[in-house]
Image: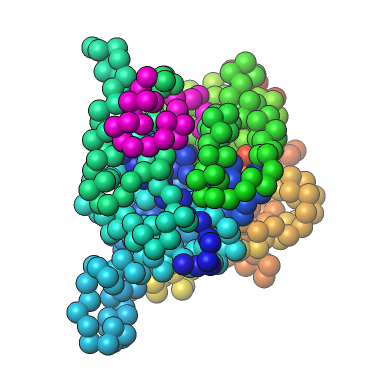
Amino acid sequence: MAKEGHKYIFVLGGVMSGVGKGVVTSSIGLLLQQKGYPVNLVKVDPYLNVDAGTMNPTEHGEVFVLRSGLETDQDMGNYERFLGRDLTNEDYMTSGMVYQSVIARERALEYGGKCVEAIPHVRDEIMGRFEAAAAYNGSRISVIEIGGTVGDFQNALFIEAARVMKMEHPDDVLFVMVSYLPTPGTLGEMKTKPTQTAVRDLNGYGVQPDFIIARSKEAIDEKRKEKLAVSCAVKKDRVISAPDISSIYEAPLNFERDELGDQLLEALKLPEKRKASLSAWGRFAKAVADKKAPAVEIAVVGKYFDTGDFVLSDAYLSVIEAIKFSAAKLGKRANITWINSKHFEKGKSTSELAKYQGILVPGGFGESGIEGKIKAIRYAREHKIPYLGLCYGMQLMVVEYARNVLGLKDATTAEIKKNAEHLVVDVMPEQKALLEGGKYGGTMRLGVYPAYLKKGTMARAAYKKELVEERHRHRYEINPEYVKRLESAGLVFSGTSPDGVLMEIAELPKSKHPFMLGTQFHPELQARPLDPHPLFTEFLKAAAVHRRK
Ligand code: GLN
């Protein structure tokens, strides 16, 4: 164990995926933190990718980049937003990462000639990682979410590691099962059986849940709580109701009302240090869910839309949340419309964008949908609709400007056409070498880098400081060779790397456009509920006063 007496809460899912383990984990973290305990939240992703960076966002949603640059699962973003602080590499692991370490050790003869096996070697590697996360963060309680559902093939070794930790330290380890209680339309009655079966599955691993979070459409009633308590051998007051809510930010407030935090502390044999102070959080949760607040109409012109059963908003999760936080701060409600940029390539007119008060082009990769995005950006510029471009959205803003203002007709990015005459966005030499060597995983310009902001610009006014640190995830850069020409045509690079070589923010002066700004970094990754991002706030302020047609 990391420290004698360090506490671990494992969050597992039953019945089906997508029931909100991440929100439960984040909420438990927030409650315990507010009760005076330093907490760290850990995400376990059972897939074999070494990190989330090589996956299309249509697979598992957005790739969330930590301060360090590690590319992780979108749940890590929720954890950071609920805790209001940065998490570290130790707080994230995949099966791929775990196996990679074990195999590297085997190749280095570190197992002393032994046969290397899932148990004990992989299991012990997992336990070591849980302990390292606890130690590194100086936390008192680790809340660890094991991805997938109980009964999956892939997550079994992680459950096994948790089981052994419980066996060795029975007072320091808890299991929370997040389960789903369906109400079949034909019956109109909430059913507990799938949860009973899921708990039995978990019992088959030698693990008994201490708490059941009962996710359902309506709150679970006393009768069903009793039924679950008896059939699953969980104390009745540890069966916690978790009905559907309009915003995930209400979850910790509901759980506090049901005294989940106190119950967990009691089960962990930890004293209550203080009442959770959730008043600021409560005000925020109310503002963010306020349906009567005046709407600001925002169009997000993206491209990760066209895949089967995948939840579209997941690909842009942090962007949506960042918009919501700033809207709530301004007493507004952002009404987001999704627009597939590919439609503008198939003849749809960009004039439909006149309906919106703000246009946002988020990050992305590759060729598809790009010309459509450029058309949308042109429309935003020419019709003076507030525009925010994130990463690719900034690069394409510069491409659009080079083409239509500077007159470089074939201006583009090397990501689309390597041999174009005017590569205003190009790949940096060190990136080129990586790509040629087929080294894709974890090799982009990742994580936090500083940027200096120019006096007298919108960016500087928004941040109210000269030096900022923002998280990045990109391979391509504004080509330094074109900077002077773009500037002389009126584009302002208001943020640059400290050596002045890399362009971090592009904007148009207020005299030309009410708000047109793009960032090479991803500001959405550092927007927090109680500390919204200034660039999103300024974008929404401008959007709120824009009159749509
Ligand atoms: N595809 C672009 C690049 O690699 C932008 C990346 C992004 O939007 N995150 O530079």
Region in magenta: 223-249
In the rendered image, residue 2, in percent from the top left (x then y), is placed at 50, 67
Q: In screen coordinates, is 199 left or right of 360?
A: left
Decide: is 118 above or below 217: below
Say which quadrant the C terminus sits in: top right
Q: Residue at x 70, y 33 (%)?
A: 279
User: Relative to 421, does residue 429 appear above or below in the rendering?
Assistant: below
Does 389 sit left or right of 210 as displayed? right
Q: What residue is drawn where x is 56% and y is 33%?
A: 259
Position of 504 with respect to 41 (left or right) is right
Name the quadrant containing residue 539: top right
The residue shown at (34%, 41%) is 13
Residue in view at x 24 percent, y 68 percent = 119
Residue 139 makes an appearance in the image: yes
Q: How is the image coloured?
A: rainbow
Horizontal side of 353 relative to 369 (left or right) equals right
Position of residue 216 measured from the top left corner of the image (x, y, whole percent): 38, 25
